[in-house]
Amino acid sequence: MIRDLLSAAAGYVRKNPDEVVRSALNAGRLRFGVPIAALSWFAGQVKGKKAPKDIEVGAVPPALRLGATVDAMGTILRAHASIKVDSVELTEDSIRVGVRLSDIKLKVLDDSETPVATLVKSGALDLSKPGNLVKFIPKRPAAIVEAHDDRIVIDLMKIPQIGNNPRVRRALSIITPLVGIRAIETDGDHLYVALRATPAGLGQAIAALRDA
């Protein structure tokens, strides 16, 4: 996996030599980009019997456009949606990411007559307000802390593999006093993460580093 990643990255830079200069200029503005092509490559590495198939990744600035074939409770669906990250809040105890979902499209790809297929074919689902649908999911994942209209808020620290990891907690205690995330957005061919520096938090970060 690592060898394939390095090979793909080297090939991309050879085809796009201006990427190095672009990265250096953006780094000076605390703005770091990932090519959409790289995200597409990673999506193509997703394997597994229940994993999404034929994943497509694109940009509808400032949102990210995703498409995939999924198995929803025995119904094969082709799903598309635009995802815009409208907030990221980092603290020592939480990583809250707010996203807005729009332009959602679902298409049944088989002849099944399951409840999911019936709902999709009938048009009874209000796909313009996915948060309201998520809100009433039985046994909703604990990581989904808010859901309303087109907006969903996820706290990654509610995922046990992340929240119970002492290394993650130590890293947050050191990083969050110094750095925040100002924005996550796309342009035509990149996904950018813009950081916000807080030099006043240096003392707190050093204290957390000593404790660690």
Image (cartoon, helix red, strand yellow):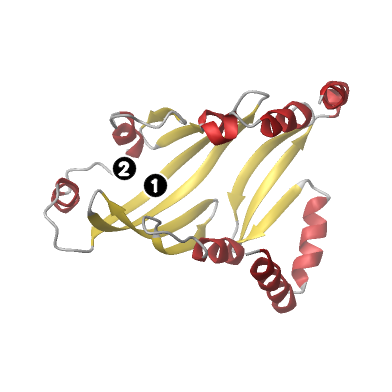
The one of 199 and 160 positioned closer to us in this rendering: 160
Q: Is residue 72 above or below residue 47?
A: above
Residue 105 position within the rendered picture, expressed as x and y whole percent measured from the top left: 31, 54
Q: CA distance from mark 1 to mark 2?
A: 7 Å
| Residue type at numbered disc 2 | Ser
SS at mark 1?
Answer: strand
Closer to the N terminus: mark 1 or mark 2?
1
Check the image and report above or below for 171 versus 104: above
| Amino acid type, mark 1 | Ser
Q: Quadrant of the N terminus?
A: bottom right
Horizontal side of residue 208 vs 71, given as left or right: right
- Rendering quarter of residue 79: bottom left
Quadrant where the C terminus sits is top right
Residue 48, image x and y in percent? 42, 59
Q: Which mark is residue 133?
A: none
93 vs 84: above or below? above
Residue visible at 43% across and 34% down in the picture: 152
Tell me if 180 is positioned left or right of 106 in this view: right
On the image, the x and y values in percent for residue 163 come to 58, 29
Query: What residue lies at 36% left-to-right and 55% top-to-bottom?
Result: 50
Kindly identify the residue that appears in the image at 32 percent across and 29 percent down: 139
Helix or strand or loop: what does disc 2 sit on? Answer: loop
The residue pinned by badge 1 equals 102
Q: Which mark is residue 128?
A: 2
Q: Residue at x 70, y 78 (%)?
A: 15
**Mark 1 vs 2: CB contact within 8 A:** yes
- Residue 145 sits in which quadrant? top left
Mark 1 surroundings: few (<14), some (14-19) or many (≥20) residues within 10 A: some
Q: Nearer the viewer, residue 73 or 135?
A: 73
Q: Quadrant of residue 6?
A: bottom right
Q: Residues within 10 Å of mark 2 (few under 14, many from 20)?
A: some
